[in-house]
Amino acid sequence: MSLTTGQAVASIAVMAGVTFLTRVLPFLLFGRGSQPPKAILYLGRVLPPAVIAMLIVYCLRNVQFALGPDLAALAGWAPPLLSAVAVVALHLWKHNNLLSIFGGTALYMVLVQAVFV
Amino acid sequence: MYRRAFRAALPATLPVMMGYLSIGIAFGLMLEAAGYNVIWAFFMSLTIYAGSGQYMGVELLRNGAALTSVAVLTLILNFRHLVYGLSMLEKFLGMGWKKLYMIFSLTDETYALLASARVPERVDPHAYYFAIAVLDHGYWILGSVIGGAAGALLQFDTTGIDFAMTALFLVIAVEQWESYPSHLPALLGCGITVAALVLLGAEAMLIPALCVIILALLLLRVRLDRQEEADGKEAV
C-alpha cells in the first residue's frame, strides 16, 4: 500500500512531533529540579539495546529459510545473513561505523544484484 | 560573537560531519529508492532530524504504516533521548529561544559532542553549543539532499541499498553489546521479536513485541538493577 502525499506529510509530521516530544519531555518534567521516577530512568537504560535488537529482527523479517542447494533457496537467506555477519565482523575488528555500514551494504548489493540472481 | 563560536566549533564537529554526510547520503538514496524524492529528504531531515528514526521512517512510508504505529515506533526508538535531556538540563539554562533549538537538535552525536565539549577561551559557551548544534544539523540535511539528488541523477541500480538500515542497527547493537553491563535486554528483545514474528507474522509483529519487551524488562527490574550495581562495583 502506498500513501497519498497528504498521508505521507502526516506521517512525517507525526515522526517530527513525537521525536521532538521525546527530546523536550525531560525539560518540561524535570526542569524545575524534581527527580524523575526510578522506573523511567531504569527503562531509559535497558530499553535501547532491547529495541535495537527488536529492530534488527524486524529488518530481517523477510528472510526465507528454505533448504536445498539450488540458488533460489540460497537467495532467500544467504545475502542478508552473510552481509549481517560481515557488518558485525567489520565492526568488531575496526570499530569504524562508516566502514561497517558501507562495507556491509555494498556486499549486500553485490550479492542481490550479481551473485544470487 | 557567533562568527568566533562557529570557527571554534567547526574542528570539533568534523568527525560528526564525516558520519552525518555518509549516513545522510545513504538515507537520501534509500528514500529516493522508496519513491520519495530529494524534497522529501530535505524536509524530513530538517524537521525530524533523527538518524535511526528516519531510517525507520523510510520503511514506514514505503509500507504505508498507520499513524498510530508511526507514533508508537518513533516514541520507543527515541526513548533514549529522555536520558540525554536529563543530563543537559543545566547546560541549556539561560539560552533563551535558542534553548528550544538545542532541545530539538539533541541527537546522539550532538549530545556526545556537548557532553564532552571543552569551550575554547574567549568563546561564549552558549554560542559554542549553539554553533555545534547548527553545524551538525546542517551536515545531516546536506548529506540527505546529496543522497536524494544522487539517487535521482545517477541511474545506478540501488537494489539492496535498504540494507544500510539493518547495518546501522547492527553497528549500534555491537556498540551496546560491548558497553552494557548486561546482555539480557538485547537477548530478550531479539527472542521476543522472533517469537512475535513466528506467531503473528511480519505485518503485525512490532507493537505486540514491544509491549511484551517493556513488560518483561519491568518484571526483571530487580534482577537487572542488582546486576548493574554489582558490575558497577567490579568496575571500580
Image: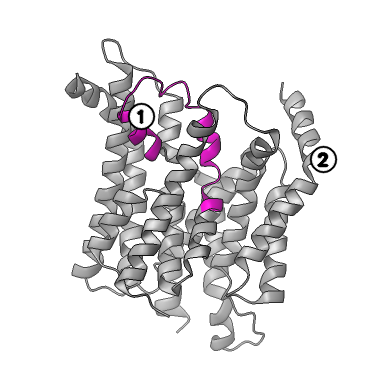
> Relative to residue A107, is residue B219 drawn left or right?
right
Q: Find out whether residue B102 is within the magenta segment.
A: yes
Q: Which residue is mark 1?
A: B99
Q: Mark 2 falls on what kind of element?
A: helix
Q: Would you say B150 lies left or right of B35 here?
A: left
- Under mark 2, the amino acid is Arg
Residue A82 picture location, percent across and down: 55, 67
Q: Looking at the picture, how far across and down is residue B171, in whole percent? A: 52, 51
- Mark 1 neighbour density, 10 Å: few (under 14) some (14–19) many (20 or more): some
| Residue B210, position as x, y percentages in the image | 65, 59
List x then y, in percent, for residue B77: 53, 52
- Crowding at dot 2, Cα within 10 Å, few <14 / some 14-19 / many 20+, comes out as few
Residue A113: name its quadrant: bottom left
Earlier sequence position, callout 1 versus callout 2: 1
- The amino acid at mark 1 is Lys
Residue depth check, mark 1 versus mark 2: number of the one nearer the observer: 1
Q: Is residue B95 above or below residue B22?
A: above
Q: Which residues are magenta?
A: B75-104
User: Where is mark 2, residue-wise?
Assistant: B223
Which residue corresponds to the image point at 62% horizontal and 87% vertical from the top-left?
Answer: A69
Q: Quadrant of the C terminus of chain B?
A: top right
